[in-house]
Amino acid sequence: MNNLISSRNLNGVQLKPRERHFLQLACSELTYVQIADQMCVSPRTVDGYREALFERFQVKSRVGLVVCAVRGGLVAL
């Protein structure tokens, strides 16, 4: 599956390029540690991206984040 991030936003939420990259990787089967490695950041930085997006999209889990991203057209699976 190929994940593609569109330039649109969801509910007025503007995503920074690193957040879009994190969101794309979060919609894959990678663990958060693997996402950190691919993004060349620490796992704590990935935790920060995750928590910020959870708050902005008002979700409580990775599954909720992915569903929200797909429904909002931010990620195509």
Image (cartoon, rainbow, N blue to C red):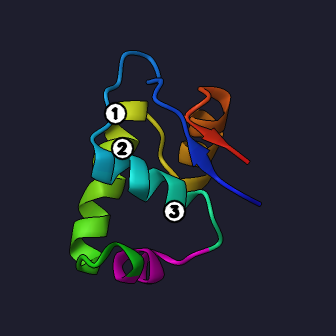
Disc 3/disc 2 C-alpha distance (Å): 13 Å
Is 27 inside the magenta-drawn segment? no
Of the two numbered discs 3 and 2 in the rendering, the one whose residue sits closer to the viewer? 3
Residue at the (60%, 57%) spot, across then down: 27
Is 33 inside the magenta-drawn segment? yes
Boundaries of the magenta span: 30-37
Q: Find out whether the residues at labels 2 and 1 contact each other: C-beta distance under 8 Å.
A: yes
* Amino acid at pointer 2: Leu
* Amino acid at pointer 3: Leu
Percent of width and height locating residue 36? 35, 77
Q: Disc 3 or 1, which lies upstream in sequence? A: 3
The residue sitting at the top extreme is 12
Give the side of residue 42 with respect to residue 29, left or right: left
Percent of width and height locating residue 77? 74, 48
Give the side of residue 74 with respect to residue 16, left or right: right
* Amino acid at pointer 1: Arg
SS class of the residue under badge 2?
A: helix
Main structural element of the magenta stretch: helix, strand or loop? helix
**Residue tagged 3:** 25
**Residue tagged 2:** 53
Residue 56, numbered circle: 1
Q: Nearer the viewer, residue 33 or 6?
A: 6
Crowdedness near tag 3: few (<14), some (14–19) or many (≥20) residues, C-alpha within 10 Å: some
Residue 40, numbered circle: none
Residue at the (52%, 54%) spot, across then down: 24
Crowdedness near tag 1: few (<14), some (14–19) or many (≥20) residues, C-alpha within 10 Å: some
Q: Nearer the viewer, residue 31 or 39?
A: 39
Disc 2/disc 1 C-alpha distance (Å): 5 Å
Occupied quadrant, residue 43: bottom left
Residue at the (57%, 75%) spot, across then down: 30
Classify 68 as above or below 18: above
